[in-house]
Structures are given as C-alpha cells and as structure tokens.
C-alpha cells in the first residue's frame, strides 16, 4: 500500500488497510443503541433540510416569483454547495477543539440559518440562508464520522455506520410527508421553523448525553502546516482518495435524483400525491440494505459487499435506461427500479466511507472534511447537470445513474489495482 509521507505514523501494507492509531478504539462512551440513534439523528438533520423541501418547491416558487421550474432546484443545490465547502473548515476544527464543541456550535448555527430561511422575503435571501444552513450542518457529517471513527474502526465502524444509516433512512421516508403535512396548516415557511425546532431538540440531546470522544493525545494543533499535512495524507492515501472519488460519482447520481424527483412525480407522471410514497419505497429498501450490511459485513468484509453493490447499481441503471428508451416506463417500473438502485447505493456508500477512513484515525476530523468536501461538492455539481437535464421524462436520471455508476466502478478498479470482489 502507498505510504503517506508526513509526520504522522505510516501505515503498514496489508490486505485491508491498517489503522493509523496507537491503540484499539475504546467503543461508544454511551450505550451502543443510544450512540447509534444519536449518530443517526445528527445525520438526519441534513436529510430533513433537503427532503422536506421537495413538496414545498412549487409553493416557494409561487411565493418568491421563481418563474422557471428548473430554477427551483437551486434551493436544494444551494444547501449542498454550503454543505460541501464548509466541511474543509469543520474537519480541522474538530481535530483541534473536539467533536463535541464543533457539533454544538454548528447545531446552534443551523437553528439560526433555518430561522433566516423562514423569514426570507426574496429568492436570493433564501438561497443565502440555504448556503449558510448547509455550511452549518456540514459539521454533522464531518464531526459525526470522526466521532464514530474515535470509537470504532474497520468492519466494526462499517457495522455502526450501517445501523445508523438504517435508522437515518426513516427521515427520507417521513420528510416529504412532513413537508406536505406542514403545508396543510401553514405556508412553506413553517417547514423551516419546524426544522429549527427539531435541531434544537437534537442539540439538547447531544449536549446532555455525549461526552467528548477525541482523546487528549490525539488533539492536533490548528495551523496551516498541520492542516495542509493532513490534507496531503487524505489526498495521497490510495484508499482515501480512491473511495472518496467513487463515492462522489454516486453522490452525483443521488443529487440528480433529489433535484429532479419532484418534477418527475408532478410533471412526468402527474401524481404529486405519490411523492411521499416514492421516498418511502426507496428509503425502505435502503434501510433493509443497511440492516443486511450490518449483519454480514463482519463476515464478508466491506470490499466484497460494496463492489458487488456498485456493480449491481450500474447494471440496474442500464436496465432502467433501456426501459425508458423503449417507451415502457411507467410509475411502477420507475418506483421498483429506482428503489432497487438506491438500495445498492446504500450498500456501496456506507462501506466506501468506512474504507476511505480506515487509515485516517489520527487525523479523522481533517480526513473526513476533505473526503466530505470532495464527495459532496463534486456530487452536487454533477447533480446539477443531471437535474437540469430534466426534459419531462426519466431518461436523463436513468442515464445519470448509469454513467455515475460506471465512473464509480472505474475509481474502485484503480484503487484496488484491478482486484474486485475479494473478501477483506
């Protein structure tokens, strides 16, 4: 394996990358079930900030005078851009000041950002608030992954992340329904007020229950040279950069789906009432996939599972594109194929994330920020192209998943030097 050139301990060659910490992680500082639920809750705030917006996009467009329907997608994209860029900041801060401090400050900022979104009087102000909101909650990705890495590594970390993702999938199931329910009693601004309230509850839970997981001997100085050194390790370690780019391609497909699914349900199939059901179908299969992963990853390993999943995702996407090109696409075929594809997405990305972090124990916060910045920002840009290609059919989305899946497989091949599907 490529050895990093830095002041940090070099890793040793092995079938599966060796951990770069001096001793075995201690495990969760609170009960395992509560730990997983809290991690899932922190991650879910991001999904709530995205998915609950989808039913409200037409109402926001009418209220703020957004004429072009495709322009409404920027309400999602603005959030993702802030979410991606800010991860470069949260990572070094989490390695210097701890996961707890960074998360608490970010959660407070996310409350403020949603309040600003709720009182926005123009499309520009709303986009600014969305960028700020994405930037704040980016800490929930960076510091949470680092927090889990403080406590677990390797297959155990993959197991924790899979269970957390399974719980996390409840939010995409409920978020569109949540948005639609709020719209029955209030206008679209009520969604932002409610997200602010939910975030305040998670803040209180985290504040009272989760101690700091960054051990004193692993605290790193906040300096340009140290941060640059950490970035260099994350960007030159073959597994870190390889699986991050593989994840970025798949995230592009996911964000293309999020950008265009509301228009697909409203315009292509003319079934807006089924948007929540669509999310329930995809998220439920993703939850089942992550539960399955948590049960088998310790036995089969992250590589065999994720490589098989990304291959199946690409094959299913090819089938989906063929169905759309031949004119056989229906509401049923779309829901079934998209749900199966998203299940493969869940199996792929949860394991990719664990493998990307395997050598990053000493610099977990910084590495997580670099990986998150690349995967989210690149994914958001790719998602814009897929979403803006919406032409009233599902063809651009199916083609986007096929292309992104193929690119992801290419990065995995390069990372593993052509050896796929091996246990470990």
Image (spheres, rainbow, N blue to C red):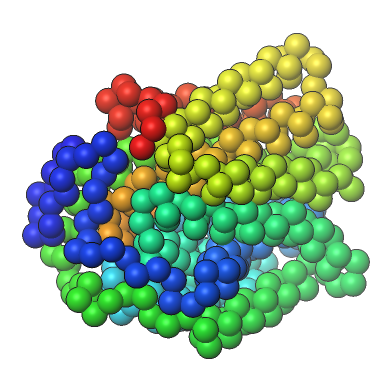
Q: Residue at x 70, y 47 (%)?
A: 283
Quadrant in which the C terminus appears: top left
Answer with left or right where residue 68 lies relative to residue 359.
right
- Of all residues, the one furthest to the front in this rendering is 299
The quarter holding residue 214 reads bottom left
Front-most of residues 108 and 96: 96
* Residue found 44% across the figure and 71% down from its top: 28
Relative to 181, residue 318 above or below: above
149 displayed left or right of 318: left
For residue 127, which quarter of the picture?
bottom right
Query: Which corner quadrant holds the N terminus?
Result: top left
In percent of width and height, residue 66 lies at: 72, 54
Q: Is residue 120 visible?
A: no
Q: Is residue 220 above or below residue 360?
A: below
**Foreground: 40 or 399?**
40
Residue 251: x, y in percent?
A: 51, 42
Residue at the far top: name it. 326
Residue drawn at x 80%, y 22% as measured from the top left: 329
Q: Tell me where residue 302 appears, x and y as whole percent.
A: 43, 40
Q: Can you name the residue that lies furthest to the bottom here?
A: 208
Is 311 situated left or right of 284 in this image?
A: left
Q: Position of residue 398 (x, y in %)?
A: 64, 26
The front one of 39 and 322 is: 39
Name the image quarter holding residue 44: bottom right
- Residue at left offset 40%, top offset 68%: 27
Q: How many marks?
A: 0
Closer to the camera in the image, 5 or 160: 160
Q: Is residue 41 visible in this depiction of the protein?
A: yes
């Amino acid at each position: 394996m490529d050895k990093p050139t830095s002041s940090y301990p070099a890793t040793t060659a092995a079938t599966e990358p060796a951990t770069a910490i001096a001793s075995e992680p201690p495990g969760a500082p609170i009960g395992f079930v509560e730990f997983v639920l809290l991690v899932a809750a922190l991650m879910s705030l991001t999904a709530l900030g995205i998915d609950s917006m989808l039913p409200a996009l037409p109402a926001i467009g009418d209220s703020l005078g957004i004429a072009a329907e495709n322009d409404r997608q920027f309400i999602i994209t603005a959030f993702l851009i802030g979410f991606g860029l800010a991860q470069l900041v949260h990572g070094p801060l989490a390695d210097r000041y701890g996961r707890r401090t960074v998360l608490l400050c970010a959660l407070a900022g996310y409350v403020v950002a949603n309040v600003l979104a709720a009182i926005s009087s123009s499309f520009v102000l709303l986009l600014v608030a969305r960028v700020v909101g994405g930037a704040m909650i980016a800490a929930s990705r960076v510091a949470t992954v680092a927090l889990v890495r403080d406590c677990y590594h390797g297959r155990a970390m993959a197991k924790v992340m899979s269970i957390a993702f399974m719980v996390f999938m409840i939010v995409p199931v409920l978020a569109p329904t949540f948005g639609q329910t709020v719209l029955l009693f209030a206008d679209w601004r009520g969604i932002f007020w409610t997200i602010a309230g939910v975030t305040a509850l998670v803040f209180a839970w985290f504040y009272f229950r989760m101690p700091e997981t960054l051990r004193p001997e692993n605290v790193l100085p906040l300096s340009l040279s140290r941060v640059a050194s950490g970035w260099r390790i994350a960007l030159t370690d073959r597994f870190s950069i390889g699986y991050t780019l593989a994840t970025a391609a798949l995230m592009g497909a996911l964000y293309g789906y999020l950008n265009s699914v509301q228009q697909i349900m409203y315009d292509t199939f003319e079934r807006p009432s089924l948007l929540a059901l669509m999310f329930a179908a995809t998220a439920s299969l993703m939850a089942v996939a992550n539960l399955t992963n948590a049960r088998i990853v310790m036995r089969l390993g992250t590589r065999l599972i994720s490589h098989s999943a990304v291959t199946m995702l690409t094959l299913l996407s090819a089938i989906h594109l063929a169905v759309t090109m031949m004119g056989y696409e229906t509401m049923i075929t779309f829901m079934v194929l998209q749900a199966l594809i998203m299940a493969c997405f869940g199996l792929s990305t949860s394991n990719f994330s664990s493998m990307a972090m395997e050598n990053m124990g000493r610099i977990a916060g910084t590495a997580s920020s670099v990986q998150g910045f690349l995967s989210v920002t690149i994914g958001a840009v790719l998602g814009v192209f897929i979403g803006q290609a919406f032409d009233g059919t599902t063809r651009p989305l199916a083609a986007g998943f096929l292309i992104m899946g193929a690119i992801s497989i290419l990065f995995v091949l390069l990372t593993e030097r052509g050896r796929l599907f091996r246990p470990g």
